[in-house]
Amino acid sequence: MSYMYIPKYSISNKILKNIGAIEGSKEVIESAPLVPSFQKQFQSDAIVRTIYHGTHIEGNDLTLIQTKRVLEGQEVYGRSRDIQEVINYRNVTQLLDELAFKRGGYEPEVLLDIHKLTVDKIVSPEKVGVFRTTQVVIKDEASGEIIFQPPPSVEVPYLIEDFFAWLNSPEFVEIHPIIKAGIAHYILVAIHPFVEGNGRVVRAFATLVLIREGYDIKRFFALEEHFDFDPASYYDAFAQVDKQSKNIAARDLTPWLEYFTGVVAIELNKIKEKVRKLSIDTRLKVKMGEQVTLSERQIRVFEYLTDQGSANMQELKKVVPMVSEDTILREVKDLLDKGIIKKTGSTKASRYVIAK
């Protein structure tokens, strides 16, 4: 008899704050008027980062440049396994594109399909696209001590069945998409359904959940980059939950969800800033007829004037806090010289507006 998995967690202040930041960034990114060529560039950049960092965190030695070359079909000198992993993960990202539009619920077969592509030509054929039938343990390379022991292999099919029952339940529908993806990420790592390739398969599946639940965010993001830059925090966030109980269903996922929502918030904020700067650069290029580069402080002034219509010097000081009046005057003078803003009114009551 199958039981549905029911995740235990609470929405802490940290999670709420992270979700708020995510929603804010999502809105800016999705409504930014980017030209199609920029949009395409952002997407291909995110795919390269996803593939590079998603394989690098698992021990792949190729550099970012080499990864890019492999994806462009160029010859690269490296371990054939490393090259194969990159090709495989590119195929996984293409599969996610196809699965994004699939109607209906979530099927365990999808997990097996992702695994097939992830470990193609890397593990022996009988282990490709099948759940593990042996016990695996993760050991500390230096000390040899066991740091992670997933459930016995006989439990894997049942745990997967219980988990997918939850994924397709009415309860699942009510949960915020970022939380859904975070829970999927943790539980599948905890079950460790395969002999090899678990990390890549799980991260791909969590991304699929985000995409299918309406959080593809133009496909500009690569969460893998953050995990890869600080793997210690990534694995520690798992460990915080792992050590609570041998029983996966009894574990409180709150510490992991605080970490996961924080990663999504940081990654989307980075993209939001890039998109913001790019859309301002684009608007100015149309306006000025040439490429104009603004400093971060000038971007803030420009955005404020765009939103508010006009501002005096006192208001602009609040927009760019923590700097001297001389610095603000210098930035404003540069904007005036470039013809981007203009001054209106008498000296004492002068206000700044965007030059038409």
Image (spheres, rainbow, N blue to C red):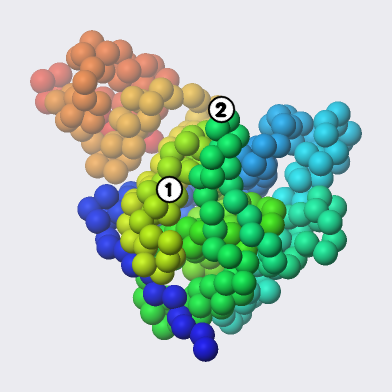
Give the label on residue 355, or none: none
Mark 1 or 2: in front is 1
Q: Residue furthest right?
A: 75
Query: Type of residue at label 2?
Result: Glu
Q: Quadrant of the C terminus?
A: top left
Question: Closer to the camera, 148 or 170?
Answer: 148
Taking 282 as reference, is 301 left or right? Answer: left
Quadrant assignment, res 289 = top right
For label 1, the residue is 239
Residue at x 24%, y 42% (from the top left corner): 308
Pointer 1 or 2: first along the chain: 1
- Is residue 87 positioned above or below 92 on the image? above
| Callout 1 secondary element | helix
Question: Closer to the camera, 317 or 108?
Answer: 108
Query: Few, some or many C-alpha atoms within 10 Å of disc 1 (few <14, some 14-19, many ≥20)?
Result: some
Give the label on residue 290, or none: 2
Residue at x 62%, y 67% (from the top left corner): 153
Residue 346 in picture, x, y percent from top left: 15, 22
Residue 15 in picture, x, y percent from top left: 30, 54
Question: Closer to the camera, 128 or 259?
Answer: 128
Residue 242 in picture, x, y percent from top left: 42, 54
Query: Type of residue at label 1?
Result: Ala
Q: How many marks?
A: 2
